[in-house]
Structures are given as structure tokens and as C-alpha cells.
Amino acid sequence: MTENETKMKTTIGPAELAALGEGQVAYVKAMRSDEIRELFPQAPQMAPGLKLFALLSASGTPILLADSRDAAVANAWAHDLQTVSLH
């Protein structure tokens, strides 16, 4: 196998990278109510400045919105999703 062939086999594109962990991994993102409509366009109008927590799939697809980090993590565990931290 040539060096170029090896590089081609180990390169992961953006779509493949986004799909890694899909259905197995999720992350919790702290957000303000002002930002919620970006991820949850169907969300009702909320008072500005509320601290909320979004549970997102490995690809960034929104799963749910909670008023505490613990509630978001508990929902992930209830659906057999491993939560990970992002830095």
C-alpha cells in the first residue's frame, strides 16, 4: 500500500466525523433562553436571560431542553446515551 493510499483510508470527512457516536453519545450545552430558538425553533417564547441546558446528539442535533444539567444528563442515561464534556 502506498503512502497516499494509507492517507486516503484514514481521512475522515466532515459528515463521517459528525456521525461518530451518533445514537451512542450526547453532550449537554448550557445556554441562555435568548439562544434557544437557534436550536429549537419550535420553542415557546421565554423570558430573556434564563439559564437552560440543551441535550444534543453527537452530530449536534438537538434532543431536548431542560432547566437543569442533571435533568438533561438523566434523560441521556434513560435513552442509553453516554454524555461527554466539550471544552
Image: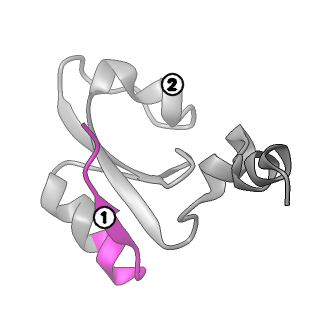
**For the view shown, which residue lies furthest in the front direction?**
2
Give the mark nearer the N terminus: 2 vs 1: 2
Magenta stretch?
Answer: 75-87
Tell me, yes or no, whether the highlighted magenta stretch contains residue 7. Answer: no
What colour scheme was applied to this rendering of the protein? one colour
Tell me, yes or no, whether the highlighted magenta stretch contains residue 79. Answer: yes
In the picture, measured across the screen, residue 66 lies left or right of residue 1, that is: left
Of the numbered discs in the image, which one, if any, rests on residue 61? none
Kindly identify the amino acid type of the residue bearing the numbered disc 2.
Answer: Glu
Q: Which percent across, then down, holds residue 84?
A: 29, 58
User: Residue 74's quadrant in the figure?
Assistant: bottom left
Label 1 residue SS = strand
Image quadrant in which the C terminus is located: top left
Label 2 residue SS = helix
Viewer-nearest of discs 2 and 1:
1
Name the residue at 24% across, 22% down: 47
Cα–Cα gap, marks 2 and 1: 22 Å
Residue 64 vs 40, above or below: the answer is below
- Within 10 Å of disc 2 (Cα), the crowding (few <14, some 14-19, many 20+) is few
Image quadrant in which the N terminus is located: bottom right
Name the residue at 24% across, 65% down: 73
Q: Which percent across, then down, holds residue 83?
A: 30, 64
Q: Nearer the viewer, residue 15 or 3?
A: 3
Residue denoted by label 1? 83
Name the residue at 58% across, 64% down: 22
Of the numbered discs in the image, which one, if any, rests on residue 38? 2
